[in-house]
Image (spheres, rainbow, N blue to C red):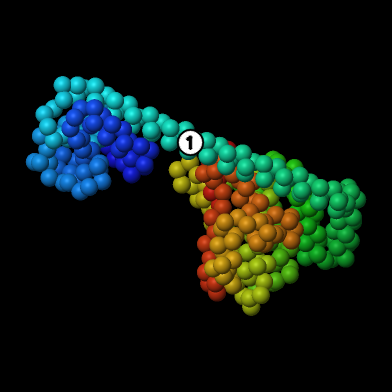
Amino acid sequence: MEMDWQAILSEGFGDYIQTIADALGQQLFLLRHVEGPVLWPPEERVEAESFAWVNPLMIDDTVAAYIAGEKGLPAVWNWVRLCLSERIQGIQLHRQLNQAHVRLIEEIKVHAELEEALKFMELKALQSQVNPHFLFNTLTTIAGLAVFEGAEQTNRLVQALSRLLRYSLRKIGQTVTLQEEMEHVGDYLSIQKARFGDRIKVSVELAEETAQAHIPVLTLQPLVENAIIHGLESQEDGCLQLLGWVEGERVIIQIVDDGVGIEPERLADIQELRANMSGRSHTTGLGFSNVHKRLQHFFGSSYGLRLESTAGAGTKVIVTIPLVK
């Protein structure tokens, strides 16, 4: 059994051994193995032959370490073994509870930050709200005129914009299938295609089994937009890849560009989720930090975003979500 003895000893276990040793009238030693090294007391002493006796210290029917002494085996050895074992288990339980408490506090903090961010977004949406029926009716009229005038490309562009806006009005707290999210990304890329032409080449390779996985609405489009605006827009030509596959019970999605990349100092800021330093999508206002926090809010701290980038060589955003259908 491998144990973090440094942590256990830092919780006063060594002093506890010394207290028992003083009561027995002989020095006790804590050994990692039968032949050493000595973990307590701090002075080095590694030769087991120098001890009068060496006995295993059992935790949950497993040898965790060995206890040695300079004189004869105490008549109360079983009591000593029991006291030491219970003390170790008590220390481990205390540490586990502390770690659980820290995790709980962190999750509460993340949840509170997310709630604040969502309220801010809702307020901004109200401040800039346009009657959606008027907007969609206007777009439908424009699309009809485009068809009447034989402008098929304009019609397709307006239809894509209409779907894009309709999708962005969905409730921020709901999830959609990855397939639906990718259709939204496709509409966004259609509009950017009209703007950039062949300057940006797009490749999408998502495994079929990822299609029905659930993801918070408006997760991928802000990341794709950031890749284009901050990574590829200033380039003469560039490539954008969207990759997705299943690993066990997880879905991994990567948004990869070969654009300008991110300088190390700024990359560290974004990775540490300093929201004021992370670029925000022009379309949704959602930045890297906000998307990461939303994913953790929906799925837990084991999921979210990871960012890799090299200045001048491009950027990769890795999205991890559970395989929830």
**Mark 1 sits on what residue?**
98
Q: In the rendered view of the protein, which quadrant contains the N terminus?
A: top left
Q: In the rendered view of the protein, which quadrant contains the C terminus?
A: top right
- Image coordinates of residue 98 in percent, x first then y, are 48, 36
Q: In this orientation, does residue 206 appear?
A: no
**Residue drawn at the location 55% of the way across and 72% of the way down:** 311
- Image coordinates of residue 69 in percent, x first then y, are 16, 34
In this view, the residue farthest toward the left is 49
SS of the residue under disc 1: helix
Residue 99 position (above or below residue 61) = below
Q: Which one is in front, 176 or 128?
A: 128
Residue 89 location, quadrant = top left
- Image coordinates of residue 235 in percent, x first then y, are 63, 76
Residue 188 position (above or below residue 94) = below
Q: Which one is in front, 177 or 108?
A: 108
Q: In this orientation, does residue 285 appear?
A: yes
Inspect the image, locate mark 1, and give the three-letter code of the amino acid beneath it: Asn
Q: Would residue 224 appear left or right of 78 to someone viewing this image?
A: right
